[in-house]
Each structure stands twice: as structure tokens, then as C-alpha cells.
Amino acid sequence: MDVSGIDEITYGADDLPVCRTFFLDWGLQLVEEDASRLVFESLNGCRVIVRRSDDAALPPAIEPGPTLREVVWGVTSADVVERFRQVVRDLPGAVDEGGRVGCTDPNGLAIRFQVSRKRDVEVECAQMNTWSDKPRMNRRSPAYERAAPIEVGHVVFFVKDVAACERFYCERFGFVPSDRYPGRGAFLRCATEGGHHDIFLLQTPDAKVGLNHVAFTVRDIHEVFGGGLHIARQGHETQLGPGRHPISSAYFWYFRNPAGGLI
């Protein structure tokens, strides 16, 4: 496995104070702050950065308004960075910042690769009883007053050409298809074995381009509910959920994100 997952994402947003409140409510830790940017971390050190939309340091936006401007993928070693350096050097938007290299994908999104900076964490997850299997007997399930996300689990984009984007990630960087909506969507993961997807590429009939959502991973279904209830109590708007996806089997609760798209 070369790519291990998402290390960092950067939004361009219009209202940093509102985003500050939102991501703190979401359960991230604010680790850096100044007039031009906010830097948050999840439990394992995955970073969420929010900058002003007009910040000249940001890559170009793939759509008008607040949206995701950059995805940094963690890789397993400096050797992988060096190999990817050769891959990206002739691609549109190529950048080489020493320990971080990248380019622009066919959808116009800035992507980067660096040796992963995330840290290992140990968390206690609830066992789940079913009719036929009851591993948790005479013990309460955990109750969460709010969520503390472990990491950014995946990103989802509307793309103008799903086949071109799938070829780009798979042929150049070793991503692996896990599921498809034929001609419309491609679920890709970083390795042959892993979670259902790390990126989902969705082509609509009008071939729109933009961010659909960023998904954060939490411990168990109880934290999905605890986190969702907390965010709702804080007055943030639900878009869909809670529910469960039939394709990935993931439990979800989607909210509207002031930094762009859904979360």
C-alpha cells in the first residue's frame, strides 16, 4: 500500500468565525489560529484547515462559493513521495515542496502527497448485539454527549468525467475500485483491502463539478447519534439522516457545512 488515507484537507470559506464555531462543535481541536486561517485536528492528527476564500495561497476553486480547495493524501514512506514526484512533474498544476508533491486532478482539484503525519490512537468501540450474536451482555453501551472524530474518512466530489478521474487515481497513484454505479459513479479506496472507499467520484447528468461532502470517522454508531444530536442542538442544519447507506453499509448523519458542501 502506497497511499494510507487522507492526511489533511483545506477549505476556502467566506466566514471564518462561523466556521470556527462549527468545527469546534463538530468535535475537532483548534491547534492554530490567526487572522487568515484556522487549523483543526482530529484525534489522530488529521488536519482540517480553513482559509478565507480570497486567500492567494489557496489553489483555484473547482466551484463558486465556499468549497474544498485541496486534499493531502498521506503515503507510507519517503520513497513513495519520490516515486510520485516523478509521476506528477509533467501533470497540470505540478508542485514540489520538498516533502510534499502534487498536481491537479482531471476535475480541477489540487491534490498533494506527503509522508503521513497522522498518529496511532487507541479508542474503545462498542460491541453490538444482534438476535443471534450477543457479545455485549450485562454491560451498557456508551453514550456520547458529542463526537470526537478520529479522522477524515473520505471525500466525495461531483465530477465532469468519472472515467477520466478513476483512471487518474488508479493508474497514477494506485487507488483501487471498490464499487461502481456504471457510467455514473466510482468508489475508490487506497488499497486492495481497506474501508469501502476513501474517495467517491459522482458524475451527474449535467456533469456538474463541485464538492458533495467530507465524511469523518467516529468510533461506533452510538457516536454517530451522540455527535449528530449535539450538532443539531447547537442549531446546525441537518441535510439528511440519520441513516445507513446500502452500498457501503456506513451509518451517516449529514449536515450543511459553512465551509462548503456537506459534512
Image (cartoon, grey):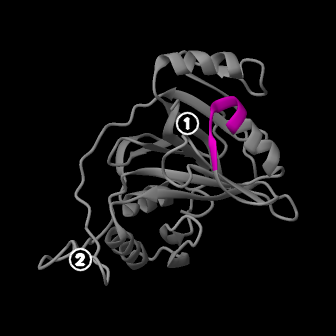
Q: Residue at x 62, y 43 (%)?
A: 176
Q: Is residue 132 visible?
A: yes
Q: Position of residue 31 (x, y in %)?
A: 35, 42
Q: Nearer the viewer, residue 20 or 197?
A: 197
Q: Position of residue 125 (x, y in %)?
A: 26, 61
Q: Earlier in the sequence, mark 2 or mark 1?
A: 1
Tag on residue 134? 2
Question: Residue 147's quadrant in the figure?
Answer: bottom left
Q: Is residue 100 above or below residue 161?
A: above
* 173 drawn magenta: yes
Instruction: State how far apart marks 2 and 1 are (Cα).
Output: 40 Å
Q: Which residue bears the numbered disc 1? A: 72
Q: Nearer the viewer, residue 179 or 65?
A: 179
Q: Is residue 57 visible?
A: no
Q: Residue at x 21, y 75 (%)?
A: 141
- Residue type at numbered disc 2: Lys
Q: Nearer the viewer, residue 159 or 41?
A: 159
Q: Callout 1: few (<14), some (14-19), or many (20+) C-alpha neighbours within 10 Å?
A: many
Residue projecting furthest to the front: 132
**Is 236 displayed left or right of 83 in the figure?**
left
Q: Position of residue 13 (x, y in %)?
A: 60, 52
**Residues under numbered marks 2 and 1 in contact, where contact means CB atoms less than 8 Å apart:** no
Q: Position of residue 87 (x, y in %)?
A: 69, 21
Stretch in magenta: 170-177
- Residue type at numbered disc 1: Val
Q: Is residue 259 above or below residue 45?
A: below
Q: Residue at x 27, y 44 (%)?
A: 121
**Is 228 displayed left or right of 92 in the figure?**
left
